[in-house]
Amino acid sequence: MPRNLLDDIKETLISAEQIQQRVLELGQQLNADYADSEREIIFIGVLKGALMFMVDLARAVNLPISIDFMAVSSYGASTQSSGIVRIIKDLDASIEGKDVVVVEDIVDSGLTLSYMLDNLRSRNPASLKVCALLNKKDRRTVDTQLDYLGFDVPDAFVVGYGLDYNQLYRNLPFIGVLKPELYR
Ligand code: 5GP
């Protein structure tokens, strides 16, 4: 196990400052878009990857939002999407008639997100939008909705700011690329 996480990072893709700046911009966009909504607004974070993003994004909006979390199965110890999505932790509250914003860490193949959106849509929210920090658009295998986006990233396995490899590196404040020898 690394004692200094930085030793395992090949390069920084997006700095902590760039993330913070972009999160503020996304917050302002959401403030403007939902300013006239008279419905309840709920941000749904996808655990655990979206944790940091949710915490910062929620503080960047001045809307009366509630926050809920969902956990779905993801990569586990591998770096490839299995295509199998399972709900491990469901929402605490109903989203029926509410304005829902799904807060995701990264959209890769799109499988996880499209499964989640189908599932959430069946619960009859008034509206359903997606805000993702990162997008690996070259890897998309299913078409998915993406309403708010932080950054496009190249096809490399990234960690930091909530994103893990084997549950580590989530606490890095930036987005970086792991040294490939660590997961090959
Ligand atoms: P998808 O279903 O779109 O292929 O994958 C979505 C999920 O896979 C993300 O929510 C994330 O948990 C994981 N994932 C995809 N790409 C990466 C990556 O580059 N780094 C990390 N740490 N997780 C990733």
Image (tube, rainbow, N blue to C red):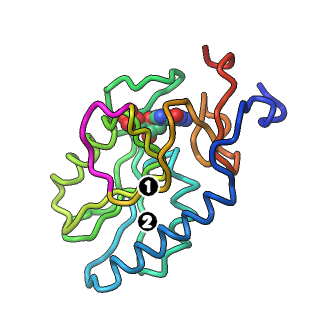
Label 1 Cα crowd, 10 Å radius (few <14 / some 14-19 / many 20+): many
Residue where numbered disc 1 is placed: 45
Disc 1 CB within 8 Å of nearest ligand 1 atom: no
User: CB atoms at circles 2 and 1 under 8 Å apart?
Assistant: yes
Q: Earlier in the sequence, mark 2 or mark 1?
A: 1
Residue where numbered disc 2 is placed: 67
> Amino acid type of disc 1?
Gly
**The magenta segment:** 139-146
Main SS of the magenta part reads: loop
* 20 is higher (above) or lower (below) than 11: below
Q: Quadrant of the N terminus?
A: top right
Q: Is residue 182 left or right of residue 23?
A: right
The percent position of residue 151, horizontal first and vertical second, equals 50, 51
The percent position of residue 90, horizontal first and vertical second, equals 35, 48
Looking at the rendered structure, the secondary structure element under dot 1 is strand
* 156 is higher (above) or lower (below) than 118: above
